[in-house]
Amino acid sequence: MFKRLAMFVRRWRWALIFMITIVFLALVTSLSARFGPSKSTVLPSNQNHQLVSTAGLPTASATVLRGPHACPVVPPTPVVTPDIQGHFNWRSISTYHPLDSYSHLPSKRPSPGPAVQHAFSATTKDAGSKTLSRQQAVKESFTRCWRSYKERAWTKDELAPISGGSRDTFGSWGATLVDSLDTLWIMGMEKEFAEAVDAAVQIDFGPTGDGEINMFEIIIRYLGGFLGAYDVSGCHDKRLLSKAIQVADMAYASFDTPNRMPVSRWSPRKAANGEEQLPAQSVLLAEAASASVEFTRLSQLTGDMRYFDAITRVTNVLEKQQGLTKLPGMWPISVDMQTPNLTFDAFFGLGAMADSAFEYLPKMHQLLNGVGPEAAQYRRMYEYAMTTAIDHTIFRPMVKDQADILIAGANVNGHRDDKGQHLVCFAGGMLALGGRLFENTTHIDVGRKLSDGCAWTYKNAPNGIMPEIFSMIACPTWSECEYTLPSDSGPFSTVDDSRYVLRPEAIESIFYMYRITGEAKYQDIAWDMFQAINTNTRTSFANAAITDVMKTPTEPYDSMESFWLAETLKYFYLIFSETDLISLDDFVLNTEAHPFRIPYR
Ligand SMILES: *[C@@H]1O[C@H](CO)[C@@H](O)[C@H](O)[C@H]1NC(C)=O
Ligand SMILES: *[C@@H]1O[C@H](CO)[C@@H](O)[C@H](O)[C@H]1NC(C)=O
């Protein structure tokens, strides 16, 4: 009997193997059709309500980030309302200027646009062992900071990294806690993530204190933090969405003004008491115009169009006045949102106080899947703004090694101001992203040279870290120029602010360049930057800002802003991870590095 069976198997083994393979493949296909990731090919039969099915709760972060998620492809109906759980309800306060109609998100299904990320081959896609050990070093840094935050500053806005105390700087709602959620998830720290989420959902975003709060910071850190955590963890934990809505409802109340422009320094107490507040006549551009990505993502996730409507009104004002400013194409850093009049100031730049107003233009186009007149508007505004910025704010510095780099400066009263700043280092990544989205090689090229410029200033500064603000001597044009300065001149002609406050913008652009070009040299640049930063900022509890990057040894001071864990270490981690972890084709990162899922991806 056994002998005959053995003979049968031997004779028919190929046929058997073939049959087993077929059955196996069929099984896998049917399972993945059932539980697989949502793809644009799965067009919902009911356009209004499509929640993609999911196979239970996630275990390994990388798998889930690529795999099954429950995020809606089209905005849900009926509209999602928050579960307030006894916390303050911002929907209950009186409205001064109600609206009777709202702008809607574009509803057309997108056709696939150009890929943002480099087409990594299977072998370079997964991080090699050198890269993984670098990644471990980044994670070790994060873990140390997180442990100290938990032990010494739990639910406070910030850990004080030298004294080991805590500090409240952003409304006392636990800025570091909320800002770090998605980083915990991305780094695979599920236990810590669950614990942090449990604490974060207890926060009551009710009116506290009498002071005014900076709504921009609240939106990018708290609203961005909850949305990012919800999106990266696959839209399973509805408490996170509920919390995002509660923060957004507070922020939305700051748009209740006669012209529906937001009040950027806003008092929650006054609003809760029913006092009317007006937009200021002098507002920083970034604060006036940077809620678009967060509010749009929230409308996509809830079906509630009030948020998208609110930022569309601001965008329309920006576009209307874009060509009327003293440097047409760009808006100045100071604007009057009460009139509104965006044309009186003469200080322009992509850096501090303006930055994310520009950064969000291409990101809005991508988040809207490039669809409809809504997305086209953001593209138009981006292209106009960048053409002006490239011509009037960017210069090539005169450097000893003749490096082919660019620095983003400013323009004051019609003259270029050759100052560089750490904050403007994001611009390289923005231009490279815009260049990919809109297939403009000039933007990719300028983005590369700006990113390389930031890497150059890191490398050539005495401790390997760029200062906050500095000046450089410019070449007459963007072509190579002879070095005519005294040979002992350092890289900067002046250093106006010599601190380094653990900022992310330089590594942010280096990360974008790596994912967009696929060039491994950007990982090496990142590693040098990480080592310089980590050695100079490490304290016994965590990492601290430093007072003077031009002095050796550097001296730390007692501050660690939440963006160190939310952004800086996240970008360092991601540049050393497999390239489809938070792929730039699947996620848009807000200006606080919170990843929002692009629908239909
Ligand atoms: C803005 O103010 C300037 C100077 O007061 C004025 O000339 C201009 O017409 C105003 N623009 C708008 C759009 O209100
Ligand atoms: C690319 O961008 C540059 C600068 O913004 C612009 O002048 C040029 O027209 C753009 N090219 C294309 C093909 O859109």
Image (cartoon, rainbow, N blue to C red):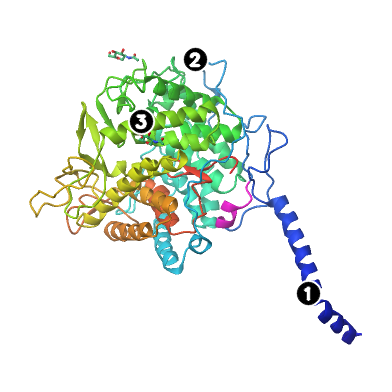
Callouts 3 and 1 close, C-beta under 8 Å: no
Location of residue 11 with respect to 355 vertically, above or below: below
Q: In the image, what residue type sits under mark 2?
A: His
On the rendered structure, is 49 left or right of 201?
Answer: right
Quadrant (top left/top right/bottom left/bottom right) for the N terminus: bottom right
Q: Quadrant of residue 334?
A: top left
The Cα atoms of the two marked residues, 1 and 2, are separated by 76 Å
Residue 29 place in picture, x, y as percent:
73, 56
Outermost residue toward the bottom in this view: 3
The range drawn in magenta is 61-69
Residue 510 place in picture, x, y as percent:
36, 51
On the rendered structure, is 315 left or right of 424?
Answer: right
**Can residue 204 be seen by looking at this rendering?**
no
Image point (38%, 48%), residue name:
508
Res. 14 mark: 1
Q: Which residue is mark 2?
A: 97
The Cα atoms of the two marked residues, 3 and 1, are separated by 64 Å
